[in-house]
Amino acid sequence: MPQAADTGHHTNGPAAVPAQRERPPGATGPPPTSRSGAVRPAARTGSGRVGAAWRKRVTIAAFLVPALALYVLLTLVPILQGAYYSAFDWNGLEPLDQFVGLQNYRDALADPVFLAALRHVLVILVLSLVLQLPFALGLAVLLNQRMRGRSLLRLLFFLPYVLSDVITAIVWRLLLQPAGLVDDTLDSMGFGGLSQLWLADPDIVLYTVFVVVSWKYFGFHMILYLAGLQQIPTELEEAAALDGASRAQAFRYVTLPLLGPTIRISVFLSIIGSLQLFDLVWVMTNGGPVGASHTTVTYMLERGFERSQFGYGSAVAVIAFLISFAFALTYQRVVLRRDVAGALTAMGAR
Amino acid sequence: MHRVARTALLVGVAALVAASCGGDDDSASDAEGASGSGEPVTIEWWHIQNNDPGLSLWEDIAGEFEAEHPNVTIDITVYENEAFKTAIEPRLQAGEPPDLFQSWGGGELAEQVDAGLVTDISDDVEPWVDTLNEAAVKMYQVEGAQYGIPFDLGMVGFWYNKALFAQAGIDAPPATWDELLEDVQTLKDAGITPIALGEGDKWPGMFWWAYLALRNGGPDAMREAGETGSFDSEPFVAAGEQLAALIELDPFQAGHMAAVWDGAGGQAATIATEGAAFHLMGQWAPGTQEANSPDGEGLGDKLGWFPFPSIDGGAGDPTDGFGGGNGFAVGRDAPPEAIEFLEYISSPEVAQRWGETNSGILPVVNGSEDSITDPPLRDILAARAEASYVQLYLDQAYDPALGEAINDAVEQLYAGQASAEDVAQTIADAAGG
């Protein structure tokens, strides 16, 4: 990250500043290591550059090492460990000596429960994109108008996001139980016939989960869109109006394109969130009944911990990781390329 | 400022690294403490009696032992049942089990034995172990060697609401499976939900299937299936068919597929609020029902107990029980004082005090039965005394993977998504039979 390196540079103290000024922009090659340059006219600047370059390296290292160490220890090493365990038939206790190669992966991909879990994730993912995000965008556009109680409404819609997943799940579990508040409310409005076994019916539970997930997260996307909308100068829409564009046209051809970067990030976060969906489902349904609301992660935890099949659970984790990783990489490289140019994709952009 | 923060971070990382490398210190000091009797010794003890009266009772007992043995400190860690299973896992994987920890015996203990995590205490407990209930003690044996000691053995049976049974005109609890089916219909006809079930937790529904299998096949079929994976044999298919016949009557409360055992709207709460007439559950049911009732009283005098009925033509003895209890396994680095403490836990005096709590813990010290005064619990004790065989809970008798596979397969039966043959076949496949 070039920015981080520059910031580090400025904290180097006065001694480093002149040296930096003389440094040609973009010079990243190794510093001259030979001291023979001392006899040449450029001698003084040369030795100054050596010292400055080294100080710069030390500074970069000092800033990078703590984060890097944590990242390696707590992220990379566990991922590699998981990949290693996934090649064994292992109950977590006995020595790791039953090497099975790719058998765990073959078993996972042949298990209808796991395939169903993947399908559930896909359903939640698509429904989120098609229903939850447009809903959040619509609300954001509404709440971007001048109106009474705008701040209060924004706060109210954002509130569910502040709750922890576990609390959300417990509250909704209570609301959705037979003859719970949801059924009572439907009943009192004369829609008692619509009452369902929201969590107990395997055909319905996944959609119930989707509604609760949306209830919790739409406020977050709404706030993202609001922030994006506020960055769009009102002059542009006014100009469009002067040119005779209807409000719908102004929205379609002015607002929406300018909101592009926000939408792309929001879609990215939504998809990653769907792929990693866990806490809410685990507490609310435990993946059931009969696995009808399993996600890849609840399935992984159930097989890994409750059945003590840690090798198999690790294989499921690796599959889930690869899916998320492949998606994130592709999305950043393809869809977000313009948005993150110069930051994440500096090398490719050059 | 920056430098301070940077140093702090570096120190933090260094501490993390040091912590992850230095995990062996505890067990090493335990082992040293064991060598001399006067040396200070710490016994690390994990139990799951996280509610009173058990919580305080264990604290008192540890305190008394410490007073008798001034060099001993007992370091108690308490977890709720499910939380314990999660918390113990990393300790076992790290090869550092607590000195004494909650164990249900059976297949899980056998796995710990295979991994060398627990100690063979056969010789140490030999002088006093025959003062305990034999069926209970056997659950903590692996290939004839003793690795743990029970303090409780209960049995699963039917808890019923006498008032609701009377209201439907049923004067005696069913003695056969066919009578039970008839009573279910009678209750339904009287407008009473017959059975409460928390199938969201899966194991409550498994109890029905397991008891039916035990009645159909007897201890031999259960044992053989555990060894060879023959869960597709006739008794297990028959059990599935009988259970399917019950499920077809639609006897459960609404939403039973998502309901839990212990929690709002769950199985215990449904019974405690008279939302259903009976259910199949272990000896701990009254305590959980009380905790899940608005007034904290549960059903009080309305609560009765009857054993699982017999099945015509079944190979199992109608007195055979299905159940399990609680006990402690001895970690591999446990000091000798830990076994002395186990002996104290297993003394008639401690058993007496457990019994007097009438809390659902049924002490296994022979002769302590009279300490229990609660009528339903006395019914269970009578059934336990009569039982020639007590089948340990399947998820504990077999290895955990098979136990969970059974739970999942039987859940499909309740959801109407599989036939009795499918269920038997799925379990046999999971068992590798």
Image (spheres, coloured by chain):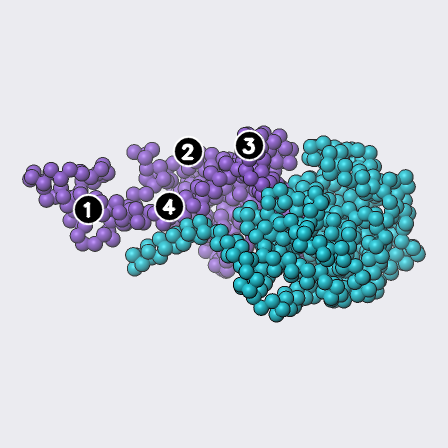
Chain colours: A purple, B cyan
* Image point (74%, 49%), residue name: B138
Crowding at dot 2, Cα within 10 Å, few <14 / some 14-19 / many 20+, comes out as few
Which comes sooner in the sequence, label 1 or label 4?
1
Badge 1 marks a residue whose secondary structure is helix
Compare residues B57 and B270 and report the one nearer the observer: B57
Spot occupied by residue B91 in the image (x, y as percentages of width and height)? 56, 50
Which comes sooner in the sequence, label 1 or label 3?
1
In front: label 4 or label 3: 3
Badge 1 sits on which subunit?
Answer: A
Q: What residue did someone put label 3 on?
A: A99
Compare residues B423 and A305 and report the one nearer the observer: A305
Q: CA distance from mark 4 to mark 3?
A: 32 Å
Badge 4 marks a residue whose secondary structure is helix
Spot occupied by residue A193 in the image (x, y as percentages of width and height)? 74, 48
Which comes sooner in the sequence, label 2 or label 1?
1
Badge 3 sits on which subunit?
Answer: A
Q: What residue did someone put label 2 on?
A: A334
Marker disc for residue A68: 4
| Left or right side of B232 for B40 | left
Badge 4 sits on which subunit?
Answer: A
Q: CA distance from mark 2 to mark 1?
A: 38 Å
Q: What residue did someone put label 1 on?
A: A52
* Image point (87%, 59%), residue name: B162
For the C terminus of chain A, give its image quadrant.
Answer: top left
